[in-house]
Amino acid sequence: MLKKFLRCFSRLNQRAERLFFLLEQLRDERAEFILSRSLDRKARGEASPFVLLRCDVHAVGPKELICFGRELAKRSLPAAFLFLAPDHPANLGRLSPQEQLTAMRELEGMGHETGVHLDPHYLISGQECSLEDILREMLSVFSANGIKPVTGSIHGNSRYKGLDENGFGTAFDFFAELGRQPDFPKLSNVHPELAESIRRNRISLESLNFDTWIDQPLWTRKNGFMVTNYISDNGLAKSGTLSVTLQPDSMKHLKLADHQPPGALTCTAARELVPLKGGGMLEPPFTGTRNLDFFSAGLDGLVKVLPSVPLLFLLHPQHYVEGAP
């Protein structure tokens, strides 16, 4: 058992050790780590602080991915692992379709949940069939292999940008519940050819049997958008930082909304501010978005107060494996 542990941990790097320390600090400060299926409970039955770990999977090998998931599970840190379509270019040479299916089953067996990380512009590029047909086929392959993805997110770093006239991505607009352009189906801020593609391929998450979606903001079928505080490691490889966003309306409340404008961090008009029980940050160290050095004392201090607010924490496992840039 010890040899297996050492072999697994040797696949991870110094960043992983630091990450697990930060997450354990959150856990030890009584942060409740939840999976997406608990979001509606947090919005209604017991509106209290939580941490939702989301792991977007690409450019990582199967052994390293399983080690990363095992280390989280060992520390009682459940996470949502979200996977691209099996043939996506970001997987090539790293994670074969069969290895992906095997990894999804193993991660579910550890107590994590699995979901999809969709790149709609890529999926329909050069295809004659609709986005709905493509997604249903992908989900049927998962189902045939004993896997039921329960949630998802949009792949934001696609080479298929599909930006609107203001520089915001349009991938969300392929989904009725997530659409951000305020004038669908007109889509006046979207290039005519792209607008026609969105209208032709628009689909409902509910029709695909998804009850949650864990982008920023979060979405559930029962409660609509849920605006949380947000940490992302998107910039970790290039700048050595975590991006931390503290939302003024999400310090003492869980913010529910009917619509999200273009841009993940664009201010959202609240439908309801649900008071947090047993939590709430009275004086946040800052509001808005800051990039904090991954190994800084400032990040350690922030971890002390984050267990009192709702938080989505986005991770990319490829940053934490041996040999990562």
Image: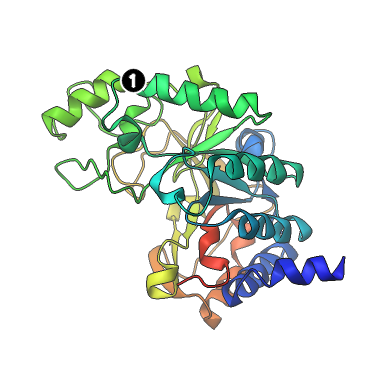
Q: Position of residue 57 (x, y in %)?
A: 52, 50
Q: Give residue 217's position: percent from left, percent from top.
A: 44, 43
- The scheme the figure's colours follow is rainbow
**Residue 66 location in percent, x, y?**
67, 54
On screen, residue 38 above or below 5: above
Depicted 230 relative to depicted 220: above or below: below
Q: Secondary structure at mark 1?
A: loop
> How many numbered discs?
1
| Front-most of residues 297 and 151 | 151
Q: Residue at x 74, y 66 (%)?
A: 28
Q: Nearer the viewer, residue 126 or 249?
A: 126
Number of other residues with Cα within 10 Å of mark 1, as a class: few under 14, some 14 to 19, many 20 or more: some
Decide if residue 223 is in sight here. yes
Where residue 177 sits, quadrant-wise, is top left
Q: Quadrant of the N terminus?
A: bottom right
The image quadrant where one finds the C terminus is: bottom left
Residue with the most extreme right position: 1
Residue at image position (64%, 68%) is 11
Residue 269 placement: quadrant: top left
Residue 47 visible here: no
Give the left or right position of residue 227, taking residue 164 as reference: right
The amino acid pointed to by label 1 is: Ser
Residue that carries the numbered disc 1 in the rendered image: 130
Residue 156 image offset from top left, x and y in percent: 36, 48
